[in-house]
Image (cartoon, helix red, strand yellow):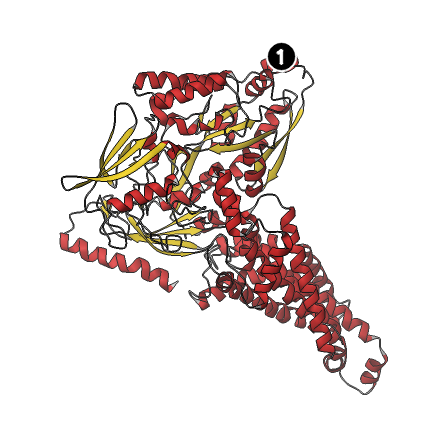
Amino acid sequence: MKKVFACFLLPAICMIALCACKGGTKKPGETKDGGAVVVGITQDLDSLDPHKAVAAGTREVLYNIFEGLVKPDKDGKLVAAVAESYEISADGTTYKFVLRSGVKFHNGATVTADDVVYSLKRCAGRLETSDPEVQVVPAFSVISDITASKDGDRDVITVTLSSPNTELIGYFTCNIIPKDYANQANSPVGTGPFKFVSYKPMDSLVMERFDDYYGSKAHLQKVTFSISENADAAFLKLQAGNIDIFPYLTVDQASELKGKFNIETGSMSLVQGLFLNNAVKPFDDVRVRKAMNYAVDKQELLTMLNGGYGTAIGSGMYSTFGLYYDKSLEGAYPHDEAKAKELLAEAGYADGFTFTVKVPSNYVYHVQTAEILVNQLKKVGITMKIEQIEWASWLSDVYKAHNCDATIIGLDSQLAPSDILKYYIGGSAKNFMNYQSTDFDTNYQKAIATVDTQAKVDLYHKLQKCLSDDAASVFLQSPSLMVAVNPKLAGYTFYPVYVQDMASVYFKEN
Amino acid sequence: MKWVRKGVAVLIAVLALSFVTFLAFQVLPGDAAMLRLGTNATPEALETLREEMGLNDPLLVRYGRWIGGVFTGNLGESAVYKRPVSELLWQVLPNTLLMAGISILMILVIAFPLGLLYARFPGSAVDRAGAMVNQTMMAIPAFFLGLLISVVLGLWFRMFTPGAFVSYDESLSGCLTYLIFPALAIALPKAAMTVRFLRSSLLTERSKDYVRTARSKGLSEGKVLMLHMLPNALPGVRTFIGVIVSEIIAGSIVVEQVFGVNGLGRLLIRSISNRDYNVVQAIVLYIGIVVLLVNSGMESE
């Protein structure tokens, strides 16, 4: 306990001294610099090397330590980060980045063009000795060359593509790391607003404000990500006051915390669906898939799962993608049990059928979704059996071997509309629902290469319509995210990608 | 000679145990390489990584490599944390041992006075009331008791902060203070069992001839109990406590989860779902050795 006290007291004393000097110009509610915050997370980190991190739960933490050439802002726009500006050639085959000068790594070194080329090549799998654990960005396979040059005294990175792709910019969030630095997995070094201090497996990750950050500096002095084994354990810590910020609250938990914590609501930026294996009976019949869509009551699902928050979706995209998102499809399959039964009868399943849905047991949210859907489907005579499986089994059985009738999962995405739709390309290894449509495939390739915005928008609307018309799966919702925030804090910001940005959080003057 | 024989028996049992664990992982779906690479895994990357991690070698080769390492004092490296397994164990093992130690102490402190008291006045109101409490305690699973303790003592009475565990290397006193509560959850049901066992062992002694002799010498009932019955009942109780100790060491896993204690059980569960073979093997080996040693040490001669 003593230690904890010291942590809080020291900055507090400094603050008092500081305020006194300024003659009390700060008003209540205004930004105050300094302080320590504990954020609760429920997944241990899978790697501290940002290029090796797979889990969304890791990337949301590392976002504070690492940056790419560009980074997303809260509206889903890409803003300059390590790059000062960028330019995409009209034909969509060359990307030019002018590097910001004087960007510092946490180890004090200045970011050089070499570091950037190295980082990009590492993400693209183009280093001479490749590390098999590095997550190669599949979209980077169109890159034919990455070069550095000088424009006056500025460094310019030129990326040349073998075929046009106007959306690749969304992937240049690829984190910039020092060239040939071997200890990334134990002592990570990046350029972000916070620098790494320590990591204890299954316990915590501590980071500190990086004072040489080029942009607007973080307010908090110290942030601890405290790792709990599961959401219940984290919730106990939260109630006891040992956690200041906790995302992923359930509706019940949120209502329990009212008054003690501020509850912020945003979006998880996921496509949650009951994904059907289009290659197995009875889901190889489009009428059955449509019947499933009519049988599901998404509004009821939203109410029961999120207390009414979240957005029901009708295809494989969510509203973050702005213009590219086709809102009209949200009502494509209204809840209609009679219609569902009719379609089932037409397909020869008048008495319904039985199938098994495989749900990863570590995602309580998806398991709860499955439980609600069981009841909804039962009303039209469909029996859905839930099989909870470990994440390891989900990856090998469902994702890799496509061995399932159906599964419930949330699909996330980079800030490129093609990224969220990549799962439906015919024959792709990621296409775990075995969806097949030549129309979709040709339009997808066209959309990526199209430069003209309106033409691109039209193509993406077509793609979403295609998935909806074919009832490729039961697209459920873009779930809401409820976050408990200590009432002394302000500035918590939601992003259209899955991150916990601590640079914007600050203690209010009181 | 007897100890050599026992040692060999323990060794063979441990080898068999570790081999079975090794086999079990072959049956489980999913492998470490795939978990590392996740949804972006390409077949090529997967293959390279499998090769690098040595997952492509035949089962016996891998087992041989591992057991060879164990005998030379090298438990290997965690595939997930990229740290030596021994380092990971050092981080969590003392926490678990402290918790087990506290709960064993609690069991002894609770069980002996109560067991003796009930045996002193069998059939009395105290004995009957005690039996009821005992029965209830034995019926509550440790994890549920853990939840109750968290809510009642932690959240209502604010005696501790659930989840605010500090590791022994940060603050030993903080760690011990916190561990009292999970230890209590482990100790209460086990203490109840021990009380019952002790009471019935003592009562069996009661009707024996030597007790009658002692009484006829004019010793008080209390002295008969403490000086004559107890020493004779002890060997049986010792074996019973041996079983309980090994149960605590293996069974604290769930309680650790409930209280968020960063211990061996938590590392084990996490390593199983990560398919972090080296870590799992080392922990199973450790638990196996402890259970076997405790049991063979506590066995009545």
- The answer for which chain carries disc 1 is A
Q: Quadrant of the N terminus of chain A?
A: bottom left
Q: Name the residue located 84 percent from the left edge and 77 percent from the top edge.
A: B208
The answer to which image quadrant residue B289 occupies is bottom right
User: Image height check: is B16 above or below A114?
Assistant: below
- The answer to whether any part of residue B105 appears in the image is yes
Report x, y in % for residue A459. Answer: 38, 17
Image location (x, y in percent) of residue A239: 44, 49
In the image, taking residue A273 as reference, residue A134 lies left or right, namely: left
Asked whether, in this view, residue A12 is left or right of residue A435, the answer is left
- Judging depth in this view, the residue of B271 and A422 nearest the camera is A422
Query: Label 1: few (<14), some or many (≥20) within 10 Å?
Result: some
Residue under pointer 1: A342
Q: Which residue in the rendered view is the most extreme toward the right?
A: B209
Q: Which x, y percent locates residue B256?
A: 55, 57
Residue B78 lies, in percent from the top left, at 50, 56
Q: Please name whichever residue, B121 or A126, is drawn nearer the observer in this view of the structure.
A: A126
